[in-house]
Amino acid sequence: MKITINSRPIEVNEKETYFDAAKRLSLNEGALAVMVRGETLSLNALVKEQDAHILTYFDEEGKRVYERSLRFVMLMAFEKCFPGVFVRCEHSLGRGIYVTVRGMKLTEDAIARLRECMQSIVKENLPFTLLPMSRKEAIRHYAARGDEDKVKLLKYRPFEHFRMYECGGMKEYFYGEMARSTGCLSVFDVLPVGAGMVVLLPDEKDPMRVSEYKPMPKLLSVFRESARWHEILDVENAADLNEMTESGRLREFIRVNEALMDRKIYEIADKIVESRARLVCIAGPSSSGKTTFCNRLMIALRVTGLTPVKLSLDDYYVNRDQVPLDEHGEIDLECVESLDTALLGKHLSALLDGERVNVPTYDFATGMRTDKTHPMHVDSTSPILIEGIHGLNDRLTPGIAREMKFKIYISALTTLNIDDHNRIRTTDARLIRRIVRDAAFRSTDPEKTFSMWPSVRRGEEKNIFPFQEDADAMINSSLAYELAVVKNYAYPILTAITPDHPHYTAARRLVKFLNYIRSADAEDEVPLNSILREFIGGSCFYREE
């Protein structure tokens, strides 16, 4: 039969794999998986009568396949070198995965031994073999191994079929496809960081070299704080959250989770008061809940006796025809030059000197500044709060001394895992928030949200993440319970996206991990000032008086 791979036609027989066909077309270099009608398949899969696209590390799905497969190699190395230790893949840290281990101390010698073992496994070029089995068989397998996290998780799996991978005699589950063999995973490194280690992935622009690790002690500290919250809440994985829902304990869980968030916001307010800062700059990536956090912080500051004011950066956009274009020839609303920094600086200086200013109003529908303005004044002891993606960049406020600023970085840093070896990506959780919000309040269908997401992510990498370690305070806006509530909104939207849609792959990826989360009928328990309300609706901050 005749198929096309990367738009190149080729005759294949029914016993050939996609790797066989790709090799004959000289497309096997750097190949990690194959995309067929929006579905990611192993290169070991037999060819079908359809068009196919080879995935490499330059594709988002290719990066995920690489990381997933490398985690398998890491677990194999632990099993060989340090059998019986408890390994947990925690979260991303730069271009790597932060891993913790219980049952041993991660000394430099231990990490060197682990690295050497991983390199040996890669050199053996061991194949990853798919092993279909029933859910009951999988539960028996993991129970025998003592992997209680997976046993608990599978009890809530809505499907009876299950897919496991075998490599080098080890059987393990990862939700998603794997690389063809361990020989595809030669670019990595393992470094000690804090009480754990980071498994570094290839560089995004040059996959033949390992990413550079840049220490991020403040971000790591926020993750540690979130881990302590999870200990207080007694939830680490999806199964723990599901048990809360099933047992009727989720409502109390929501109250405690929100109380922890409230306490954190008041701690930050106390730090601002102590610093005597006059300008509070709030920044974070998309769907972090910046607006709601800013409103709650203003209330916390008022409790201390201050009378802060909020200045919206949205009002300082230049007219649309003056916005620079990005490298793709598209209007770049996320660069600093899209803001009238000269006028903003002038207004901030005047406000800090006790003067009254007339703040402009920007109309996003027309892309123009309107004639309407609104007056603003702040007393000599209270701060001005501004929130936006450039809040941590001093180019936004060049005329104001650093000691007068208090910088806050906020992000939804998801620390709830599917299980100990399968994490929920922060970017995926934020994307779900944005899809739900865009559909409900911005008349934006999910296809458009998916289309915009790569541009949004590029803007974050360029304008936000490089400045996060300069923050005076960081806050994780992720709520441990939120997926159980937000699934009620996201699941119908995502499952309505069919294979013929261009973003079916991304939608299916989100659906697959949401399948492990039990929906909860507890929205009435979510406080009206909750950050989650910014996405599901009902926030007290958006009500008209």
Image: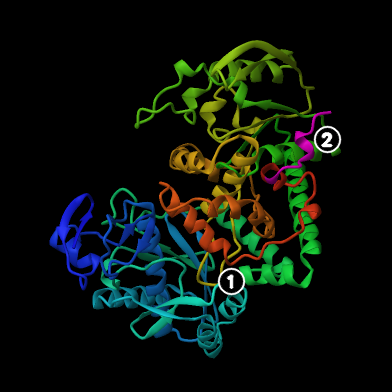
Q: Give the magenta-colored segment's residue range.
A: 536-545
| Left-right relation of 9 to 111 | left
- What kind of element bears circle 1? loop
How packed mark 2 is, by other alpha carbons closer than 10 Å (few <14, some 14-19, many 20 or more), is some
| Left-right relation of 456 to 403 | left
Q: Quadrant of residue 272?
A: top right
How packed mark 1 is, by other alpha carbons closer than 10 Å (few <14, some 14-19, many 20 or more), is few
Q: Amino acid at mark 2?
A: Arg
514 inside magenta stretch: no
| Left-right relation of 479 to 457 | right
Q: Residue furthest top?
A: 371
Location of residue 285 with respect to 56 vertically, above or below? above
Give the residue number, with chain letter if any, for mark 1: 158
Which residue is found at the position 29% from the left and 56% from the top?
Answer: 56
User: Looking at the image, which is closer to me, 61 or 232?
Assistant: 61
Location of residue 494 with respect to 453 vertically, above or below? below
- What kind of element bears circle 2? helix
Count of labels in the image: 2
Give the residue number, with chain letter if any, for mark 2: 302
Q: Quadrant of the N terminus?
A: bottom left
Q: Residue furthest bottom?
A: 144
